[in-house]
Amino acid sequence: MSDLEEEYELAYFEDNGFHRLECSECGARFWTRDETRDTCGEPPCDTYGFIDDPGFAEEYTLAEMREAYLSFFEEHGHTRIDPYPVAANRWRDDVLLTQASIYDFQPLVTSGETPPPANPLTISQPCIRMQDIDNVGKTGRHTMAFEMMAHHAFNAREDVEGEYAYEGEVYWKDQTVEYCDTLLEELGADLDEVTYIEDPWVGGGNAGPAIEVIYKGLELATLVFMSMERDDDGEYLLKDGNRYSKMDTYVVDTGYGLERWTWMSQGTPTVYEAIYPEMIDFLRGNAGIEYTDEEERIVQDAARLSGNLDIDDVDDVEAARGDIADELGVDVDRLRELVEPLEQIYAIADHCRTLAYMLGDGIVPSNVGTGYLVRMVLRRTKRLVDTVGVDAPLDELVDMQADRLGYENRDTIRDVVRTEVEKYRETLDRGTRRVEQLAEEYAREGEPIPTEELIELYDSHGIQPDTVEEIASEHEADVDVPDDFYSLVAERHGQEDDEEADDGEFDPADFTDLPATERLYYEDQNRMEFEAVVLDVFEREDGYDIVLDQTMFYPEGGGQPADHGTLSADDVTADVSDVQRVGDVIVHRADADPGKGEFVRGQVDSRRRRQHMRHHTATHLVGHAARQILGDHIRQAGAQKSTDSARIDLKHYESVTREQVKEIERLANEFVMENVPVEQEWIDRNEAEAEYGFDIYQGGIPEGEQIRLIHAESDTQACGGTHVSRTGDVGSIKILGTERIQDGVIRFTYAAGDAAVEATQQTEDALLDAAEILDVTPQDVPETAERFFREWKERGKRIDELKEELASARAGGSGGGEEVDLDGTTAVVQRLDADMDELRATANALVEDGNVAVVGSAADGAQFVVAVPDGVAVDAGDVVGELASRVGGGGGGPPDFAQGGGPNGEDLEAALDDAPEILKQVLNA
RNA sequence: GGGCCCAUAGCUCAGCGGCAGAGCGCCGCCUUUGCAAGGCGGAGGCCCUGGGUUCAAAUCCCAGUGGGUCCA
């Protein structure tokens, strides 16, 4: 493997008396001032050296350390940037959560397409790493939520000019290491104890040399020099087995763990006690965890010892527990008893912080995406709280963290948590009942609850296997949870084929040589006519693809359908049925060829387009109104406009009421009546983000350095669609309905302009029609409908009663029926020509009188009911089977009451004539 | 985005091709000084909607609607 050895030979190391050494334990190469050093400094090669012996001159709280860091870099020429949301999917669609500060600048800034908001910059970015969820609380140093402090510099090679959004070199490796070293020195660290380990970094298609900064056994920072990209012909072969080559841009990507720096300054047994001491005190007090001095000492010693071990996940913790107990001279069970409640409390504090970040940034619990992640965390936290015996509502615990983090939407956060806890409680209730039932069933049979049931309970009903165990044990049922339970669940899901059918409609290769089409529809959104030159025409199976130098036709995008219309040359008029954007080229699909090089006059179908414009502006207004009525967390999950209606999918944590819908409709129409201008603005994206935040990306993330903003009322969104000039041009907005398309997402369907009038008229027509049928005024329809429904039910019951009466009257009168003697029992064979209910009632009545009943009807095909009183050896099913076969059908049922029939009603009489014979045969059988 | 599960009395559910059921709740009567409770009787169902299969569908199939849940 070609290493990046020479990459680490920094002048800074040279000038400051560093030595490059090799760790005697793990073989890692590292740089240090201490020539006599033997090991790299990182556990397990070394142990923590700062517990009870802080590594910095002073103690810092989390906030103090953050401020110290940011102001240090500010003083050294960096611009301080506000943190981004933890919901990274709000500005990029390849990840769900922000996991590192560099996520804020990927992919557009790191690739050089967009300039960074400042260069160089410093930031403290909240991050969430779900993959650490199992470690939290147990390892003493893992947290799911953390802040990554960082300074970034974006460089471009000197020999490339103008190709990238930033130019030249700001600084690179030497300066980066120097900053780190200086910061440590300023905080009073003993620089002789600091090691810089060479550890090349690879990730996400990029790579570069990197340095881990270790001090007193703790990894405080990673300095990454992102400078390479995947390239099968590249000169560097890196640790992931792939080849890489140098890029034109190179980026300083550092990561300083705020929590770890704070911990280092305090020297507490675990990181958790350093970063949220108040919350931990509160939780301990509330859960009533009080230890004697001796117990407290055991816990602290255990924490120190586990920190010294190479613990990177929970499995290691359990394995290490025994060793730690041995070393402390206590029983392993006693140790677990003492430590576990604390581990759970640490986890609760961390999870609450995670929830505060996620909910504070407007993530709404749901069964998809980030919403699902927040739901998982919340449920896990709730379980922990219950297990450890914390007696405080979860929303209050989350609020403690939200308060500390300075969120302003704390009421909404609490509301969401309460709603979600309630949902979880319902799920648990449902699950508990289900498990109880299963447990009783299997306990009765003396069998354990099978794994298949456990998987079903978890996968379809959300019940954890340990919950099942708990409930089952109360009902004396056994449960055997296999070790590989979760992989069994995964197996059940199999491979999901997310093969996206790409519409091979347009081949981008055809258009790459053509110049960008000038987009006239942005210049004047109200003009529908234009002139243009045909640059090229491609013949297709079902028409022609026409490329012009400029166009007024809006290509499908942002949920707005393509314009229709015509392109006319001197002797040809082509109907345009579709318009698409391929890169910067706009392609018109038409039914005729106006001829390459020709002048054409374009005419957009203005009625269609105007409806799209109205619906597009209406979409912004409905979203804006919904945000005001339902809360600031409301975000768009998707939208689609068409000619006669439009819809917007909004993220919301509970279902909307009819009242809320009315309020939204009223407010949206108020915006329309205000008749304020709808303005478009082209603006630098960083500027837009700084001014309006990431909420402008409701409809997706646009490309490019310049983005287009649409201002409507007090709403601002990045949007590429066409809009009316004033809100009044929308005409009116009629919300047609709402539906929950998935958990946490509500779809609003509405109509604007002409379509609103039409939709209202249709609803009105339906009501008027109903009123006419009922022969009442529209106002009386609900009441009348209710009365009719009630009367209809009453009559149904009355009919049933009458049928019964009729049946017993018939049976009693024994008219019409032919009586046959069957060894002392009388059988009555009767034809009724009535429906099945009546046949059954009659047969029942005959049986009451001690008769065997054979009743038939030719009312609808041929039907039979045969009923037999107790103690008579005739199988009704056999009789019906035989009778039914004679009318071309079948039948059956229990021995005392059977029914059947067939399509041939004309054969009924003959079949009934044979009935006595059949009865006798069956009796003798 | 995908998978799986569920929908029957006011509530919780059973029934899984052949007469619509249980427990709790509700109403009436009885027992009791009263309460807790017990006994007897009763009311209460578009078996989610729409198609299909079948002599026959709550039950099987398809589609839809509503809810739940797991995974990316």
Image (cartoon, rainbow, N blue to C red):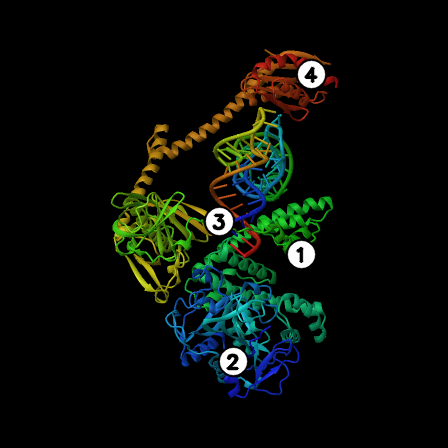
Q: Which mark is residue A484?
A: 1
Name the N-terminal-most of marks 1 and 3.
1
Q: Nearer the viewer, mark 2 or mark 4?
A: 4
Quadrant (top left, top right, bottom left, bottom right) of the N terminus of chain A:
bottom right
Name the N-terminal-most of marks 1 and 4.
1
Task: Read off the residue under disc 3.
Answer: A501
Disc 1 and disc 4: Cα gap in Å? 61 Å
Residue A288: quarter of image: bottom right
Quadrant (top left, top right, bottom left, bottom right) of the C terminus of chain A:
top right
Q: Amino acid at mark 3?
A: Ala
Q: Residue at x 64, y 69 (%)?
A: A339
Q: Secondary structure at mark 4?
A: helix
Name the N-terminal-most of marks 2 and 4.
2
**Residue count near mark 3 (Cα–Cα under 10 Å), binned few <14, some 14–19, many ≥20:** few
Q: Nearer the viewer, mark 3 or mark 4?
A: 3
Q: Which mark is residue A919?
A: 4
Q: Secondary structure at mark 2?
A: loop
Q: Nearer the viewer, mark 2 or mark 3?
A: 3
Q: Secondary structure at mark 1?
A: loop
Q: Is residue A379 above or below residue A10?
A: above
Please tell me which residue lies in front, A806 or A680: A680
Task: Read off the residue under disc 2.
Answer: A59
